Image: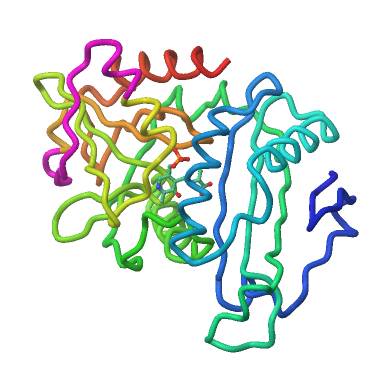
């Protein structure tokens, strides 16, 4: 596999990062994951805009122009012959002697990108529907910034797996924030799609924006507000969205079947609409 590191396209074994990289020592960096369908990037502009915002919130510069980022993405897709999968991008504050104080703004950032080839459209989990458990959300308070500090989401996913579930929904002050690496939705008994409103409590998903637009275009009713696990268990349907999962139905929450325990029609319709639109 060919990866990109600070201006160079190199075979993965030759890609090297300093032990003093602040991404490694302080999780001082941000990332984006953009999916690829039929060799084409899905919603690159949205991911680039969120990257710019994440960097600005952490007082970091864009490592290069958006056009250059796009051409690096495309080059990696071509070099690695990716027809379906994703491109991962990470920017860190660069290399500096270990100090809690940020290094000078002149310190060059570290920019790395790599691809993963995998089936994203035909996904067995989306056909079967995901089983979810709820776990307390103890992440930091700036989840709107897509930082690389993913230890708690990773632990939450492991807890879910140990309990025989596929993933976890995170709960804070009695209401759902989001999934470990996706946004969370329910469809109420009267057919309204409900998902948490945007704030620093959750990441503003690029797929979330696109899917809510699809839903509104399809004349579905959307409400952006918090909901509880009890409301989700009593809902007609539940689902998640993310760049790699698109729209994924949820069939069970904390052992209780959602609706009839099968992927629901709203989730299936939105998945199909979003994938079609992305082709
Ligand atoms: N995760 N919320 C969290 C906490 C996330 O990590 C993600 C994405 C999302 C969905 O955002 P988007 O639709 O822009 O992918 C919501 C990516 C896919 C990951 O960490 O692999």
Asked if residue 22 lies left or right of residue 179, the reply is right
Which of the two residues, 125 or 81, is positioned nearer the viewer here?
81
Asked if residue 101 lies left or right of residue 207, the reply is right
- From which residue to which does the magenta span run? 213-231
Asked if residue 173 lies left or right of residue 164, the reply is left
- Report x, y in % for residue 115: 72, 41
- Report x, y in % for residue 153: 43, 58
Quadrant (top left/top right/bottom left/bottom right) for the C terminus: top right
Looking at the picture, does residue 127 appear above or below residue 28? above
Which of the two residues, 261 or 212, is positioned nearer the viewer here?
212
Q: Is residue 112 magenta?
A: no
Looking at the picture, does residue 181 appear above or below residue 46? below
Give the residue at x 16% y 41%: 225
Q: How is the image coloured?
A: rainbow
Quadrant (top left/top right/bottom left/bottom right) for the N terminus: top right
Which of the two residues, 36 or 238, is positioned nearer the viewer here?
36
Q: Quadrant of residue 222?
A: top left
Please count the marks in the image: 0
- Report x, y in % for residue 191: 15, 19
Give the residue at x 80% y 35%: 75
Looking at the picture, does residue 156 appear above or below residue 79? below
Q: Quadrant of residue 137?
A: bottom left
Give the residue at x 71% y 23%: 39
């Amino acid at each position: 596999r060919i990866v990109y590191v600070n201006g160079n396209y190199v075979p993965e074994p030759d890609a090297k990062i300093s032990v003093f990289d602040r991404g490694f020592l302080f999780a001082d960096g941000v990332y984006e994951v953009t999916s690829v369908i039929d060799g084409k990037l899905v919603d690159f502009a949205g991911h680039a805009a969120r990257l710019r915002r994440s960097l600005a919130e952490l007082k970091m510069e864009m490592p290069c122009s958006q056009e250059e980022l796009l051409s690096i993405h495309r080059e990696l897709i071509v070099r690695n012959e990716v027809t379906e999968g994703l491109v991962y991008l990470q920017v860190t504050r660069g290399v500096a002697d270990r100090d809690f104080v940020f290094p000078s703004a002149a310190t060059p950032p570290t920019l790395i990108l790599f691809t993963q080839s995998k089936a994203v459209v035909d996904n067995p989990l989306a056909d079967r529907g995901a089983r979810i458990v709820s776990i307390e959300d103890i992440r930091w308070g700036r989840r709107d910034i897509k930082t690389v500090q993913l230890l708690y989401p990773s632990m939450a996913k492991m807890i879910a797996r140990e309990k025989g579930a596929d993933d976890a929904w995170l709960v804070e002050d009695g209401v759902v924030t989001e999934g470990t690496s996706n946004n969370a939705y329910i469809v109420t008994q009267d057919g309204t799609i409900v998902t948490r409103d945007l704030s620093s409590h959750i990441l503003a998903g690029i797929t979330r924006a696109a899917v809510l637009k699809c839903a509104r275009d399809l004349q579905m009713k959307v409400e952006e507000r918090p909901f509880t696990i009890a409301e989700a268990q009593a809902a007609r349907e539940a689902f998640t969205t993310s760049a790699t999962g698109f729209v994924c139905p949820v069939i069970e929450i904390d052992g209780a079947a959602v609706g009839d325990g099968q992927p629901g029609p709203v989730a299936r319709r939105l998945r199909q609409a979003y994938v079609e639109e992305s082709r």
